[in-house]
Amino acid sequence: MQQPSPLLTWKASVDENLCVGCGKCTEVCGTGAIRIIDKKAVVDFDRCICCAICMKTCPRGAITMIPYSFPILKREEDFDEIIAQLKGIGAQLEEMERSIEEL
């Protein structure tokens, strides 16, 4: 099977040298992708939708949009693995429910 090419998208990135941790970006981020940690803004790429509102709001220009790539799932192999993991989680939940019922 041919290796899939990565899917390219854009994400917010914080320049720690410019960020002063004012929190204005966290106030405008509608997805909650930005948090202040150790007095610096940190972006959760899984939540960032690249709306650029944070970049426009940052008074120091510490936020830019950068290209970010992640692999596209290989249909058969990856989905089979995900399904197996979900079945395992389902079995664990059933076992937990049985344990609760026994209490």
Image (tube, rainbow, N blue to C red):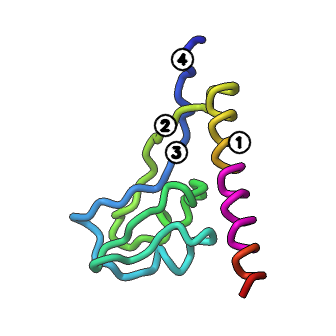
Which residue position is annotated with label 1? 83
Task: Looking at the image, tell me whether mark 2 or mark 3 is earlier in sequence order.
Answer: 3
Between the C-alphas of marks 2 and 3, the distance is: 8 Å
CA neighbours of label 3 inside 10 A, class few (<14), some (14 to 19), many (20+): some
x, y percentage for residue 98?
75, 73
Query: Closer to us: mark 4 or mark 1?
Result: 1
Q: Is residue 88 left or right of residue 6?
A: right
Which residue position is annotated with label 3? 10
| Residue 61 within the magenta-colored segment of the rendering | no
Which residue is pictured at 47% across the width and 61% down the height? 44
Compared with 99, 11 (above or below) is above
Between 62 and 43, the residue placed more toward the observer is 43
Judged from the image, the secondary structure of the residue bearing numbered disc 4 is loop
Q: Which residues are magenta?
A: 87-97
Tell me, for residue 3, which label it has, or none.
Answer: 4
Task: Looking at the image, tell me whether mark 4 or mark 1 is earlier in sequence order.
Answer: 4
Task: Give the amino acid at mark 2.
Answer: Ser
| Residue 90 within the magenta-colored segment of the rendering | yes
